[in-house]
Image (spheres, grey):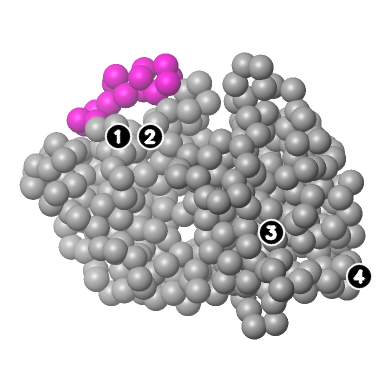
Amino acid sequence: MPNPLAVVVSFRLGGTDGVSVEAAKWDYAWRALGFDVRRVAGELDERPQRGDVVLPWLAIDPPAGHTEPRPDELASAVDRAQLVVVENACSLPMNLAASRAVAAVVSRRGGPVVLHHHDLPWQRDQYAGVTDLPPDSRTTLHVVINERSRAGLLDRGIDAQRVVHVPNCFDADTGAAGERDATRHAMGFTHDELVVLQPTRAIPRKNVPGALRFVEELQRRLPQRRIRYWLTGPAEDGYGSALDAVLAGAPVPVKVGRVDRAVDAYAAADLVLFPSTWEGFGNPLAEAAIARRAVVAGPYPVRDELAALGLWFLSLDDPSAAATWLRAPDPARLDANVACVRRHLSVASLPGRLRDALTRLEQPGPHVAVPADA
């Protein structure tokens, strides 16, 4: 008997953006539960997998000649699915026409749909006027990555039975160790420089100006160390010119560029900087914890949920505390951070979390065919 098919739909998949990274973890979880998985996206940024479908009109920025949605193409791609999983395309309408087309197709289907909400329209000023998303029906399960989003959906009248919080999850046990010396050499850092890493894209809410103010204050408190600011980038959403202007006045030497593996970037860093004003989750706080690096975090709202789990980090508004840490790190705090991720955010728990979430569709919605041995 063939495995049930889960079709995953998104603007883009396979890249290094947060949605793609988490969708790949869910891909592992669906397969662990016994599903076959097909990806459908406007852009696929890695080697294709068997069954992939690229629909260019689904991209955040569709190419010329592909801007008009073609719902029939999407309907055909999900036609034989036992489960449709929409990764943020019905949540944050970065391509509004495509988002509405996806919403219409999954609503007409009538079968089980999981909407994985990384962000929601009212959480971004430019989308606050979009009130018809996300779609809802008795066969729709809403999975959010933070309690703030869960509360927002309940406030808008969605049935609490079909709204579940599944946080982003991480592998704290089997990942490869990063290469510190080779990475620092490749990026042009000397052995005695203090490297402050901001492992984010460059868009306004990632708060590069706030990062530069912080490193300026940190350099004043550590005059005996030469600080280098490393932004992985790249600039997106038309932010390139603004970024150039901001970096032109940087108070310390700046490096912009990625390495192939995130673990190498964390290994090469002495301190991780995450100054965002808004994030749906904030993966670098957990990733840096696994890499045993201290994080300086900005005051984005969901940060408090991670702190409530027991995750420790430094504050963007207290460079003195960061300077004190760098002079005398406390390994016990780093040990506790790794233990916190293992206890609360382990990727090994993800298949079970999703299996339990799917049971919410069994009453009153249809049964989802998860194999008995999953």
Residues at badges 1 and 2 in contact (C-beta under 8 Å)? Answer: yes
Please, is residue 114 above or below residue 182 in the view? below
Horizontal placement of 213 versus 46: left or right?
A: left
Residue bearing the label numbered 2: 233
Quarter holding the N terminus? bottom right
- Which of pointers 3 and 2 indicates the residue nearer the eye? 3
Find the distance from the CA under tag 3 to the CA under tag 1.
35 Å
Magenta region's main secondary structure?
helix
Residue in the picture at 42% in, 67% down: 171
| Residue interval drawn in magenta | 240-254
Using the image, tell me which numbered label, if any, was put on residue 6: 3
Name the quadrant of the C terminus: bottom right
Q: Earlier in the sequence, mark 1 or mark 2?
A: 2
Q: Disc 3 on helix, strand or loop?
A: strand
Dot 3 and dot 1 residues touching (CB under 8 Å): no
Magenta-colored stretch includes residue 206: no
Mark nearest the camera among 3 and 1 is 3
| Residue wearing tag 1 | 257
Circle 2 residues within 10 Å: few <14, some 14–19, many ≥20: some
Q: Are marks 3 and 2 in contact (CB under 8 Å)?
A: no
Q: Residue at x 24, y 32 (%)?
A: 255
Image quadrant in which you'd find residue 329: bottom left
Residue type at the position of mark 3? Ala
